[in-house]
């Protein structure tokens, strides 16, 4: 009986990103990939493909490189308005913290997002997601956090889900109610956390709008004690947690996140040794955000050597947001991860494939291997390092994405 595939990619160079294979990229050259029902069903040498194989579609890659579809595991791309005026302020010497304390920052985006209808919010956000998809992104995480009340947080999460359908990408949603203190709760942070835990989070959970829960544990955000309450509420509703931690100071948030088995702790410029050790023990992914580091002109590097030494998986994401990382290019973030954080190109690519999948709690993607989702990207490059080398250039040729249609899976 002959092999039958929905898709057969032949004569490919494959950066599998599979740690079970040797080399930083887990490379296979002169390879073939067979896809059936949206899953990789065959992977091996091109000259090993049986002569009687049948495929609905066959692609000759001509030696070009195939990677897993890219994964942007930390974004805030659903929002209204922009904060270009704050960009000007920071260039004049005003700090991000001072802007936030003066009523700018996150709260200014909250005002614009609350005022936007669902359709207006969708229309403003769609180009940002489309830009990521155009660079080979097949999975993206989108956080709420600019609504800061039950109705508007739910609105953001619903729009995020609609965006995924519109743009043909798998969207994972994260509830970030504990992002900032809304004006109506000024001076009453504990009361606001009460509302997050007893009203907003239960409502989001009932509607099935969130895949995870996040918080901003920082000296201009919420304390470790307040964050703990959010995590306890998330646990009660069966939702995994993530955390914005150690971006501006060491609040020991990463260790707290690890205590709750967090999927990831993100930013981490001020992460201390205790946090690194706790993350390593818990298997919590370190998500580094070079766009925010660049945009805020930060000078304190995340502790890359310590993370490597402890074996903490390192992911990279855009942190697409209006205030501190208005970036819609994951490829640019690969370059910045290498130039700013001194990561290697293979580490950076692992950071937007297998480690980014790990940061979202997804074990069905992020590597090219039999049994994994057929989320694949074909690139016009001669070596995978070029994905991090170029800046402002998109070498994507084509994306193959696992899609769900009528209860079945296929490569789209």
Image (cartoon, rainbow, N blue to C red):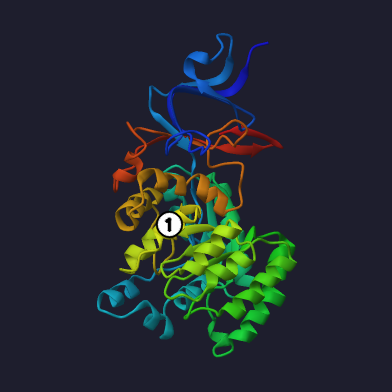
Q: Residue at x 60, y 75 (%)?
A: 227
Q: Residue at x 37, y 50 (%)?
A: 334
Q: How many numbered callouts?
A: 1
Where, by quadrant of the figure, is residue 326 drawn? bottom left
Query: Which x, y percent locates residue 327?
Result: 38, 58
Picture layout, residue 37 above or below residue 219: above
Where, by quadrant of the figure, is residue 255 drawn? bottom right
For residue 287, side relative to residue 196 (left or right): left
- Assess disc 1: are there few (<14), some (14-19) or many (≥20) residues with their C-alpha within 10 Å of its C-alpha: many
Query: Which x, y percent locates residue 284?
Result: 56, 58
Q: Residue at x 61, y 52 (%)?
A: 361
Nearer the observer, 81 or 257: 257
Residue 214 visible (yes or no): no
Determine whether the residue tagged by mark 1 lies in a helix, strand or loop: loop
Screen quadrant of the C terminus: top right
Where, by quadrant of the figure, is residue 242 drawn? bottom right
Q: Residue at x 49, y 40 (%)?
A: 69
Residue farthest left in this picture: 92
Picture layout, residue 370 above or below residue 331: above
Residue farthest top in this picture: 51
Nearer the observer, 152 or 253: 253
Residue 270 visible (yes or no): yes
For residue 290, side relative to residue 263 (left or right): left
Nearer the observer, 358 or 402: 358
Residue farthest bottom in this picture: 187
Query: Which x, y percent locates residue 47?
Result: 48, 14
């Amino acid at each position: 009986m002959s092999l039958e595939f929905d898709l057969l990619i032949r004569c490919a160079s494959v950066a599998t990103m599979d740690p079970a294979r040797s080399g930083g990229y887990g490379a296979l050259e002169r390879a073939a990939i067979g896809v059936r029902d949206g899953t990789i069903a065959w992977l091996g040498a091109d000259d090993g493909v049986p002569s009687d194989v049948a495929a609905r579609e066959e692609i000759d890659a001509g030696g070009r490189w195939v990677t897993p579809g890219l994964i942007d595991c930390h974004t805030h791309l659903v929002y209204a308005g922009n904060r270009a005026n704050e960009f000007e302020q920071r260039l004049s010497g005003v700090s991000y913290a001072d802007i936030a304390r003066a009523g700018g920052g996150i709260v200014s985006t909250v005002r614009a997002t609350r005022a936007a209808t669902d359709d207006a919010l969708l229309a403003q956000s769609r180009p940002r997601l489309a830009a990521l998809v155009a660079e080979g992104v097949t999975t993206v995480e989108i956080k709420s956090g600019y609504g800061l009340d039950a109705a508007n947080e739910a609105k953001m999460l619903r729009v995020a889900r609609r965006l995924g359908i519109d743009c043909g990408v798998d969207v994972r949603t994260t509830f970030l109610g504990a992002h900032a203190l809304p004006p109506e709760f000024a001076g009453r942070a504990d009361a606001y956390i009460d509302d997050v835990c007893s009203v907003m989070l239960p409502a989001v959970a009932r509607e099935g709008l969130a895949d995870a829960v996040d918080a901003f544990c920082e000296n201009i955000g919420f304390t470790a004690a307040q964050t703990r309450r959010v995590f306890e509420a998330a646990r009660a509703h069966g939702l995994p947690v993530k955390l914005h931690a150690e971006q501006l100071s060491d609040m020991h948030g990463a260790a707290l996140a690890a205590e709750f088995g967090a999927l990831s702790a993100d930013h981490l410029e001020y992460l201390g040794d205790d946090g690194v050790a706790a993350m390593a023990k818990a298997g919590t992914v370190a998500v580094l955000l070079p766009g925010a580091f660049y945009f805020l002109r930060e000078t304190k590097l995340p502790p890359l050597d310590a993370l490597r030494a402890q074996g903490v998986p390192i992911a990279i994401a855009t942190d697409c947001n209006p205030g501190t990382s208005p970036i819609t290019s994951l490829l640019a973030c690969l370059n910045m991860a290498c130039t700013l954080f001194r990561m290697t190109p293979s580490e950076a690519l692992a950071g937007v494939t297998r480690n980014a999948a790990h940061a979202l709690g997804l074990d069905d993607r992020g590597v090219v291997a039999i049994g994994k989702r057929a989320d694949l990207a074909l690139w016009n490059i001669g070596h995978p390092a070029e994905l991090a080398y170029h800046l402002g250039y998109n070498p994507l040729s084509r994306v193959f994405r696992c899609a769900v249609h009528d209860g079945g899976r296929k490569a789209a």
